[in-house]
Amino acid sequence: MKPSRIVLRALSMALATGLASTALAQPMVSLGSAVYIEHTGAGANTRSLQPADRLSRGDRVITVVTWSRPRGNGGFTVTNPLPRAIAYQDSAHDDEQVSIDGGRTWGHLGDLRIGARLATAEDVTHVRWRVSPQTAAQGRGNIAYSGIVR
């Protein structure tokens, strides 16, 4: 198996594990995900996404997590572990929380520390989003975040 396929398989397994644990905790929520590679065209403003079938070092990947909840009340949390081969970059939502210790503690990047230094995006091991009751009442939504293949 090529290293790039190993990275993609690890990413898929991590997503499935994180999504499955969230779905089990909230049986009324269905989750799915898709991983894309972002390509920049000749012009700086030209970007496209293509489904990831193979990853290489330096690829910028966009993960789109979809959720649906046809019934039920209240909000819920979506937690996603990042494979070690992916360095977190950013989320499409400003309200994400990250963990740098395997999901034991949570906070915002810029507030978390490793020893005396501030944690960086490369230290992130998990990302989570709280879906508010108002947003959950819409019945479906997407959450997207990006990373770089190490």
Image (spheres, rainbow, N blue to C red):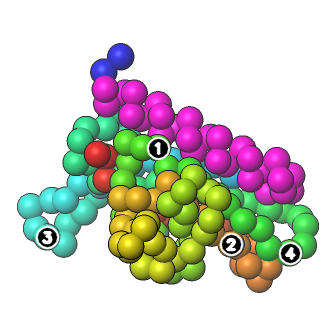
The quadrant where residue 97 appears? bottom right
- Please name the amino acid that badge 1 sits on: Pro
- In this rendering, the label closer to the viewer, 1 or 4: 1
| Image quarter in which the C terminus is found | top left
Q: Main secondary structure of the magenta part?
A: helix
Question: Could you tell me which residue is drawn at 38 percent across and 48 percent down?
Answer: 86
Q: Would residue 20 be counted in the magenta stretch?
A: yes
**How many residues crowd mark 3 within 10 Å: few (<14), some (14–19), many (20+)?**
few
Badge 2 or badge 1: first in the primary sequence: 1
Mark 1 surroundings: few (<14), some (14-19) or many (≥20) residues within 10 A: many
> In front: 34, or 84?
84
- In the rendered image, residue 91, in percent from the top left (x then y), is placed at 46, 69
Q: Which residue is mark 2?
A: 130
Residue type pointed to by label 3: Ala
Q: Are marks 3 and 4 in contact (CB under 8 Å)?
A: no
x 73%, y 60%: residue: 68
Location of mark 1 (residue): 83
In depth, the one of 104 and 90 nearer the eye is 104
Q: Which residues are magenta?
A: 3-30
Precedes in sequence: disc 1 or disc 4: 4
Q: Nearer the viewer, residue 69 or 121?
A: 121
Decide which of tag 3 and tag 1 comes sooner along the chain: 3
Which residue, given by chain and number where applicable, does mark 4 sit on? 74
SS at badge 3: loop
Figure quadrant of residue 134: bottom right
For marks 2 and 3, give the CA distance: 33 Å
Q: SS for tag 2?
A: strand
- Compare marks 4 and 2 and give the one earlier in the sequence: 4
The residue at 36%/54% (across/down) is 87
